[in-house]
Image (cartoon, rainbow, N blue to C red):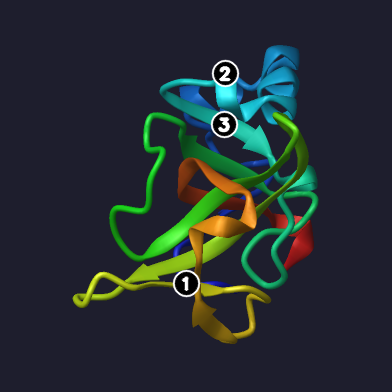
Amino acid sequence: MNAGAVVLSRSAQVSPEVSALDESDQQDNANARMATGRRLIHGNGCQYPQAVGPSDLLMVDFDIRRVKWAGLYLVEAIDAGQVTWRGCRRFDPRPNGELWIDETGNGDWTLFTDGCGWRIAGYVEQVYKPASAL
């Protein structure tokens, strides 16, 4: 299991944040640009091997729109003003001002450049994994 992952089982008590997931969250998943605050979203459109799977739930802070610290972020690829791809990536800002990204989720860190057409849609605070996935 990944460090920082929380396991949800059928018998576990679910917090109000988790139980508040409804159909409107599916719309936020499809348009993170318009989402604000902390939201629980499905991981099916945000897969990142090892860290995020299709059956996971993500607690995302959509008010964070830039990389502030090392961690997992929800990113979107933009082409002609439209979201063409969405996923999660780990970022690590360095003291010298460089921003590094683990593109694959396997520790393949490379220098991130702003010219790639990506934007930060939010900071992933927590990944909730179903007990059946363990």
Q: Picture coordinates of residue 90 (x, y %)?
A: 51, 66
Q: Outermost residue, top direction? A: 24
The numbered dot on residue 3 is 1
Tell me: 89 left or right of 66. Answer: right
Circle 3 is placed at which residue position?
A: 40
129 shown above or below 66:
below
Q: Picture coordinates of residue 44 (x, y %)?
A: 79, 45
Identify the element where label 2 is drawn: helix
Q: Quadrant of residue 10?
A: top right
Q: Residues within 10 Å of mark 1 (few under 14, many from 20)?
A: few
Task: Check disc 3 and give the amino acid type.
Answer: Leu
Task: Check disc 1 and give the amino acid type.
Answer: Ala
Task: Check disc 2 and give the amino acid type.
Answer: Met
Tell me the mark number nearer the camera, choosing from 3 and 2. Answer: 2
Task: Measure the C-alpha gap from mark 3 to mark 2.
Answer: 14 Å
Residue shown at the point (46%, 31%) measured from the top left: 62
Q: Picture coordinates of residue 91 (x, y %)?
A: 45, 66
Residue shown at the point (78%, 44%) measured from the top left: 45
The numbered dot on residue 34 is 2
Viewer-proximal residue, 96 or 10?
A: 96
Mark toward the start of the polypeptide (2 vs 1): 1
